[in-house]
Amino acid sequence: MELKRVVVTGLGALTPIGNTVDEYWNSLISGKSGAAPIQQFDASKFKTQFACEIKGFNVQDYIDRKEARKLDQFSQYAMVSASEAMADSSLMESSPNVDRIGVIWGSGIGGLKTFQDECENFFKGDGTPKFNPFFIPKMIADIAAGHISIKYGLRGPNYVTVSACASATNAIIDAYNLIRLGKADAIVTGGSEAAVNAMGVGGFNGLRALSTRNDDPSSASRPFDKDRDGFVLGEGAGALIVEEYEHAKKRGAKIYAEIAGGGMSSDAYHMTAPHPDGIGARNVMREALNDAELNANAVDYVNVHGTSTPLGDVAETKAIKQVFGDHAYNLNISSTKSMTGHLLGAAGAIEAIACILSVKNNIVPPTINHVTDDPEIDNKLNFTFNEAQGREVNVALSNTFGFGGHNTSAIFKKLI
């Protein structure tokens, strides 16, 4: 069976450093940090009192107030980013066969704020169960995909992928696979997360996963720096319209890049820690390269998982050196989480967009906040510290890894 080619024809982003794709990209290239003191709740008693929140966002600018009340924040974010991507792609203007257009979305947690609110209301009462009828439909992780499909009448494959911080990349890879197998003409894919709330921050504080640099939030996310002390929690969404190449070509769609391959693996090691030798990360990058039928030397840029955790950054660096050998020193490597924070299940979506736009524009966004080299990390590698770098980017690889040992890598390349 001959596999079909798959391309990206639309993008949408709602991030801590920009509420549209253009704003997001411009902030990435200028090295803007999205970290600041938390505004959504009183975090004064928490170990971490800052996050990368979305700014200047009013859901009623996008969704009717009555309808918005039926959606948890993670679904609101999904709808807004998907709307931008759909408009960007002009997909619905070409009278497509909606039976062959699907939605595959990613979210690691789903409606965490809805769950928190309903629990608080119940325990504040006298024990009489008085729950919002939208409690379950707002909370469940699959509902964002459902709402997107309902809005556009898309009757193709429809589901959510849940693999912690790898969720959105899993969704993108699934969409890619279904299209190249001929199961769909186009798929709305990506991911969203809204965990900047008391349960989200408190839970990750309990794990000692978050930075506690409360005196200087904007410099707290510092991947590969000796003084990194954990990740910065982010929120938002990213959406991609992925489409079968001939289908896109026939309707005259603009094409950003081709999806060349995807890989998935497991560390099979620890609940939250990466394998210290980076075995799972090594395997997933090799799998993605094999799937794309590309030699490692073909890759120009790696957007790393790079969360700014002591163990994770070291393990991923080891994996890169194992996969790329001497070519590792020719790569540009960067962690855009240094600017956006960690969007958990949505991370892979906005980082895929960063890769796609790097391929399109031949610019690599930086890893900001680097001050001190870590002796455990090979700093002869080009981590694109502190300033964006221009270079020919024909192939970009995006890594996302999640609690439970879930690893995903996706490869994007210039359309030839």
Image (cartoon, rainbow, N blue to C red):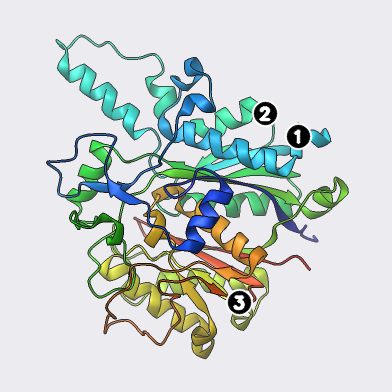
Sequence-wise, the earlier of marks 3 and 1 is 1
Q: CA distance from mark 2 to mark 3?
A: 38 Å
Residue drawn at (30%, 54%), measured in percent from left and top? Answer: 232
What residue is drawn where x is 20% and y is 53%? 207
304 on left or right of 413: left
Front residue (pair 199, 185): 199
Q: Nearer the viewer, mark 3 or mark 1?
A: 3
Residue indicated by mark 2:
152
Task: Decide which of 239, 207 is in the foreground and name it.
Answer: 239
Q: Which residue is mark 1?
A: 92
The quarter holding residue 202 reads top left
Q: Which amino acid lies under the numbered mark 2 shown in the image of this protein?
A: Tyr
> Is 112 rendered above or below residue 340?
above
Evaluate if marks 2 and 1 touch, with contact meaning CB atoms under 8 Å apart. yes
> Which residue corresponds to the image point at 28% horizontal and 58% vertical from the top-left?
272
Q: Report how far apart the C-alphas of labels 3 and 1 lie in the structure.
A: 35 Å
Q: Position of residue 307 (x, y in %)?
A: 35, 62
Relative vertical location of residue 60 with respect to residue 292 in this rendering, above or below: above
Q: Which mark is residue 391?
A: 3
**Residue type at tag 1:** Met
Q: For the residues marked 2 and 1, what is the alpha-carbon distance in whole angstroms?
A: 8 Å
